[in-house]
Image (cartoon, rainbow, N blue to C red):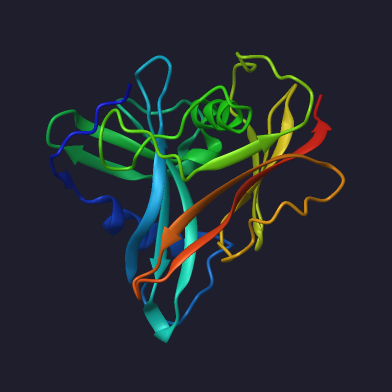
Amino acid sequence: MAMIYKTTMRPGKTELLTAWLPTRPWYAATGHAPELDRSGGFRLDDPEGEVGIEFMVLTDTSGGRQTSYLVPLTYRGAPLDGAEAALVGTSEHGVLGTRWIYDGAHDPVLVGQLLALVQGRAVAQDQCDSGVSDPSVTAWYEGPGLPAALPQGRPETTDTVRGTEVRVPGGPAIALTRVLRPGDDARTEPPEAAGRLTAGWTTPDGAAHRGLFAELRAHVTA
């Protein structure tokens, strides 16, 4: 079980992401600096207890509109080899010291646990409290069985204006939704879909939404 510390991080995650988000091809620029609200999300446990895993929802209210983004993050006590381009930034944690914060789509630990979650082998955890599950996160999976241990090495990741495609050798392709669309959680999957992950978030105006966070494609990469 991951321990969530009630402490400070300097700079804070929102501060780091305010600078990082506009560098992403899927970010919808408003002509203003992002104004970010933490609108939801959940955590996953690393079986080895080394890497923090968080799926964060941030709503940008700049430019007079609300756009919600899914930002999966990992928190590490040392740099991840070969992942320099995926580094969001470093922060000083009040208990754990320096933390290297990565776009989790590039981190094999997060990708492995995301696959486990979709297949029912992992449980979504509350974003703020240790030892509390988040039953609002739901998943289904109808594809072939996947090994508990994925091949070593970083996943192959491609960002587009629509989202992020993640490919793992020996596993399915994962389509991560980046710009969340309320109501896009109905089970109307395309024929090649093997599974889906849906969850909710609440925008700054108090509206509760639910949508598609990730989709697994039946195609297995070599």
The residue sitting at 65% across, 16% down in the picture is 151
* Position of residue 187 in the picture relative to residue 94 (left or right): right
Up/down of 8 relative to 5, above or below? below
**Quadrant that contains the C terminus:** top right
Up/down of 124 relative to 146, above or below? below
Q: Which corner quadrant of the image does residue 91 belong to? A: top left
Q: Which corner quadrant of the image does residue 47 belong to? A: top left
Q: Please state the horizontal and vertical placement of residue 196, each as a whole percent of the image.
A: 67, 43
* Position of residue 167 in the picture relative to residue 94 (left or right): right
Up/down of 106 relative to 10, above or below? above
Q: Please state the horizontal and vertical placement of residue 216, each as a whole percent of the image.
A: 71, 39
Q: Please state the horizontal and vertical placement of residue 194, each as a whole percent of the image.
A: 77, 37
Toward the front, the furthest residue is 135
* Position of residue 56 in the picture relative to residue 140 (left or right): left
The residue sitting at 73% across, 24% down in the picture is 169
Toward the bottom, the furthest residue is 64
Give whichever of 192, 10 is nearer the camera: 192
Q: Please state the horizontal and vertical placement of residue 3, each as a whole percent of the image.
A: 25, 27
Give whichever of 168, 112 is nearer the camera: 112
Up/down of 60 relative to 9, above or below? below
Number of labels in the image equals: 0
**Quadrant that contains the N terminus:** top left
